[in-house]
Every structure is written in C-alpha cells, then in structure tokens.
Image: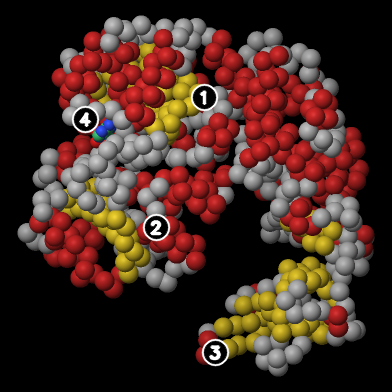
Amino acid sequence: MVKDPSDFEIQYIKGVGPRRALLFGRLGIRTLRDAFYYLPCRYEDRSNIKKISDLKYGEAETVSGKVVSAGIIKLPRRNLRIFELTVSDGSGLLKGKWFNQPFMKKNFMAGDEVLLCGTVRRNSYYGTGFEMDNPEYEIMNDDDDPLIHTNRIVPVYRVTSGLSVRQMRSIMFTVINNHAGEVSDTMPPELLAKYSLPGLSESLSRVHFPDTQADTGLLNRGRSDYHRRLSFEELFMFELGLAAVKRETVSERGIAFTSGGGLLKKLLSMLPFQLTLSQERVFREILEDMKKPYPMNRLIQGDVGCGKTVVALMAMMVAAECGYQSALMAPTEILAEQHFINIHEIVEALGLNVCLLTGSSRERPLAGIASGDIRIVVGTHALIQEGVTFKNLGFAVIDEQHRFGVMQRALLRKKALNPDILVMTATPIPRTLALTLYGDLDYSVIDELPPGRRPVKTILSQAKQKESIYRLIRDEVGKGRQVYVVYPVIEESEKTDLRSATIGKSGFEKVFPEFRTGLIHGRMKPLEREQIMASFKAGGIDILVSTTVIEVGVDIPNATLMIIIHAERFGLSQLHQLRGRIGRGSHESCCVLLAYGPYGNEAGRRLDIMVESNDGFRIAEEDLDIRGPGEFFGTRQAGMPDLKIANIVRDAALVNDARQEAFALSERDPGLKGYPLLRGSLERFWKGKIEIFKTG
Ligand code: ADP
Ligand code: MG
C-alpha cells in the first residue's frame, strides 16, 4: 500500500518534538490524521475584541489587556478564597474572579498580555465597574502569530497538563495549514454531491480555523457544513462496517430450524400466564428467522420486566426440539445464576438437562456439554472463553447487549455451527438509535408490560426521615412481603464516606430483631450467593441487604419494597434497573430513594425524574442527555469504534442518511472494488475491531 501522508507522526511536525509528542499521545494524537480529527471543543469569536470602556453588562465578550495586579482575597466568613486579576486595556479596568482556585495565582504576572472571555458582570462591591466570574483566559506571547489567536474565530482545544490551549492552537495551525491540503478524500463523490457536503481538505481546514464570516453558534453546536461533512463520513464508515458484518452473516450457512412445536406447546401450557401480544409478535419474528437457512442475528429490546426471558426460552425450546443445544449468556455471574434459578425447574420438567457455567462454578459439567446430554447451558461469557466444547450449539441468547459487542458475537459464532443469536437488552433506546448501534442486527421490540402490573410508586426521602422508612418496612413485611435495601458499597472505607451494606445489615438486624435479614454482594462465593437468592425467593429472608449485584435480572414478585441508600450516587439507568426488581407481581410496590445531602443539580435532576416517571424510554432519553452518548451506550466496551465527531443524538438525521447509503453501497458493490480508497479508510476505521473483508 502507498504510504498515506496522514500517517506521518506528529512528533516530526514543527513545534512538537518527542517531549510534546508524549503529551499529544495522552490526547490520543499520534499521527497527522489523529490531529486532523481532533476537533476543537468550542470556538470563541475574537474577531470582535471589545474595549473595556464599551463593555455591556450581561453580554459574553472577549477583552484583551495587560495584567495590572493579581492577588488572593479571603472571605473568611463564607470560607471563600477568591483569586482576582485586574486587567487594563487603556480604556478601563476589568476584574477576573476565580473562586477557591488560589493556585491560579502562579499563572499570572503583572505586565502579562492576556485575553479574558466571559460574561460581563457588575462589580459586586462597588456596584459599578466590570468583572467576569471564572472567565476563559489565555496568556499571550510576544512571538505568537497574532493572526492565529486573535482577530478571528479561534478554536479552543481540550488539552492536558503541560500543553496550553495556545500551544496546541499554534501546532494545529501548522498541521492544518501545511498538511490538510494533502489528504485524499475517500468519500464517493456522488454522495458528497447528493448531500451537498464540502470536500475533506476544505472541511478539515474550516472546522479548525473557521472563516471570519462563520456562525460561531453553529460551530459551537457542531452543526457547520464542515462538521456535518465530517460527521457524515464517520457515520458512513461506521455503517459500512455494520453492513459488511451483516452481509457476511447472511451469506453464511446456518441452521434452518424446523420445529414440530411439541416442546413449545408444553412450555406454554405450563406457564401461569398468557403471552402479551408484543411477546407473541416478537416470538413470531424470531421463529421466522430461525426457519431460514442462514444465521439469525436479532436484538430484542424491551423495558425491565416486559418478559423477554420467556420469549427467549420459547425459542430455546424450538432449538431443543430440533436436537440442538442452546446457551443463555449473561454479563454477570449473579444474573447468570438468576436465569438459572428462574428457568431450571420448568426446563427440567420438560425433560431437558440444564446446567450453570460461570467462571467460578463449582462443578464444570464439561462432559455433559460435549456429549450433548446437557441441552441448555446458562452462564457468563466463561461459556465461550474457556475450554468449553459443545456438541452442537445451535442457538445462543445474549442478555444485556450493551456489555457485549460485535467481536464477542463473532467469537461465539466461531465456537459453534453458526448458531442463531438472539440479543436481549433492557436499555430502551429509540429505534433509529438502536438501528445505528446494532446495525448488523435485526430488531424487535416488546413494547408492553404484562397486564396487571402497577407502576412502582417512588418516593424521594432524606436521611433524617429514618422512622418513616422503618415504618414502611415493618408494614410491608407484616403483610408478608419482602424488602430489598440497596447500598452503593460493600464495606465502609477511608476513601469514601458512604454507608455500606455490611454495616447496614447489622443495623437492620438491630432495628428488626423479629425479621430475617440477609446480605448479598459481589465478593461472596457463588455458592453462598445462590443459597441466599434461593432463600429470598423461597421467602426465607424478609429484608435482603445488597449491593447493586441485584441490578439486573433478579425476579422475585413478592418483593415489593426497595430502599436505595445514597440514591444520589447512582446513575439514572442504574436506578431504573434497580427499581425494575420490584413491581413484578400483582401487589403494589414502592421504591424509596434515600438521599444524603447536599448533592448537586445533576443528582437532583436524576432523582426527580425517577420520582416522576416509570417509563423506561423517557428515563433513557434523560440519561442520554445527562451522560452523553459515548458514556450512555458504552460503545467502547462493546468493541465498537469510537465516534469521535458525530453525535448520534444530535446527528440523528445524518445517521439515517449515512446508514441508507452505506447499506445501498454495500449491496451494489460488496467488496468496494470500485472504491479502493474508501475501502482502505474503512479497513483502518474498523481495524482491531472486526475484519471487514475476509475474502477478495
Ligand atoms: P425481562 O427479562 O424482560 O426484564 P422477565 O422475562 O424477567 O422480564 O419477566 C419478568 C416477570 O414477568 C417474570 O416473572 C415472568 O415470569 C413474568 N412474565 C413474563 N411474561 C408475562 C406475561 N405475559 N404475563 C404475566 N407475567 C409475565
Ligand atoms: Mg431480564
């Protein structure tokens, strides 16, 4: 392959060198390409630097001037230390204030030329004069090129200690000025024309150093044409990869299950309930896939408690009837244990052998799995990682997709005879987003809860209100119900001041000597955990004190009260998952979010949403909004390439276009023979994640 100039190492760029190259490395920048795609985190319009005398209160402005004085003011009564910087530009004085950041003082010397950027406020002492609270600042340097840092819309980059924004900007200027013109645009030109997208060189230049006429608002929202072009490209690469994976799977031979349905009928007759319409529809979709002679790859999405597991179990019966083994894989041992406890009775009653296999299983019934005597294996991914051989694994269910990605699925496929794969997730994300992220999967959604479920009543409570919580517990256990108490940590430690499950348990034992209290957490031996869960399920424990190990999958309808200690510390999705453990039977359930103040606004918002809503979709949307997509979807964990530029929420419309075009192109020209450059970019984009082109 011809050496691509974008692969040129950053350390050889003027102004970088080996020492700074290390700092760049920390930011993930090793080559010119990395630098090109390291976009500014925001932009400042400095084409219009104001005179201090012309400032207006309430406006966001940029000012340039000399430091007159820099010092720390103490306000002992409010326990505040304020670093105050006074700047003059000849027309007047401006004060910059930073609260409780005394270390700022060492950054400034009288006489330094500085830029301050922030909202102009009235001086709080005198009621006149200008000041800015926590302004953005930059210290100017005599030998800087003034055209890079002022008199224009300037990019601001996220930097690391040892590298200032200003240094970074200078280097970026060199990189873009000297090298952005050399890049080859690998996007199909017809697509650029169709969507009116600018070329790559131009986009890179303008996204780093915008025109003076550019709209700073659009830039800051990542919505300039140049941002759009780069986002489209990234999404297109992402979707092309998924399209390739999908083609690969579809072109492979898989098992065509043809079931008489005897086992399935028996299973249905043993269930104490009727399937919901959603469950029936989704099962039909699965069955259609299973009958086809190539491997199924389907995602079922549905809120906690909507009954995904039963549907999966039905599909496993079809596989069993056709003589194949099935696996049910969960992300944690405790969830695997739960699935096992939940299904083994009914499965055994149907005459099938089932076993549990996790990293720490006591017995490893490998012989039974190899001989095919065991028909259903429930476990963690120990199931595919360790020396486990199946006789004929034909069907695999993966619970909780967001921790299990494209790569692991590929591994699983290799382990067996191209089994049909069913992925279940309780993260309720909008359909278009699901299609993007799981684009190589077909998609089904269970969008109703079983009848008779009552929404869980949720109460926000402060730590002081202990007595009323004790009363709730006493009432509930008095009615024969059971209670979960969830703690953020197992044991108290020096590092945090959080209450712990271990101490919590002894506390509850003292308050309620008449009740049976149990403790469960992730550091226990699996056997012990299994016994405790089994005992809770059988009604042998009234109050189960736990950590978040019970977050997913645990299904005990008689548990109707959950107290979440330090609820302010948990994420939204996590709270929703936890709360999903109750409200599973016909009795009314209640979740108490016990918060220890003071907590921040964001925590307050999470708690409020939980109190207001039981709707998984709404909660997921809010969570997405609070945490941002990367964190929310955990794409990195799932072995997906990172989206550095596109934001699947902000760019939802682009996602759709990119997806359609990618799948269409992949259909027309699967090996991308007509697009050798694009093919190169694609391979690079997915490198180390999946092998896109196995042949040709
Ligand atoms: P999910 O995995 O989607 O969170 P589960 O499959 O664990 O949900 O089901 C939750 C509970 O609802 C289980 O106790 C299950 O037996 C029960 N259930 C499932 N489907 C129905 C239904 N159609 N009617 C009543 N109860 C159901
Ligand atoms: Mg489940």
- Of residues 248 and 653, the one nearer the viewer is 653
Disc 1 C-beta below 8 A from ligand 1: no
Whole-number angstrom distance, CA of label 1 to CA of label 4? 30 Å
Q: Residue at x 42, y 72 (%)?
A: 598
Question: What is the C-alpha distance between the residues marked 2 and 3?
Answer: 41 Å
Looking at the picture, which amino acid does disc 1 mark?
A: Leu
Q: Amino acid at mark 4?
A: Phe
Q: In the rendered image, which residue does mark 4 sit on? A: 273
Is the shortest distance between ligand 1 and the CB of mark 4 under 8 Å? yes
Categorize mark 2 by other alpha carbons within 10 Å: few (<14), some (14-19), many (20+). few
The tag on residue 441 is: 1
483 sits left or right of 385 in the view: left
Q: Which three-letter amino acid code belongs to the residue tagged 2?
A: Glu
Element type at mark 1: loop
Residue 244 in the image, given as x and y percentages of width and height: 62, 19
Above or below 89: residue 695: above
Q: Residue 16: x percent and y percent?
A: 82, 49
Neighbourhood count class around disc 4 (C-alpha, 10 Å): few under 14, some 14–19, many 20 upward: few
Q: Would you name the residue on which mark 3 appears? A: 76
- Tell me the SS state at disc 2: helix
Q: Which residue is mark 2?
A: 612
Q: Earlier in the sequence, mark 2 or mark 4?
A: 4
Amino acid type at image mark 3: Pro
In the drawing, what numbered circle is on residue 494? none
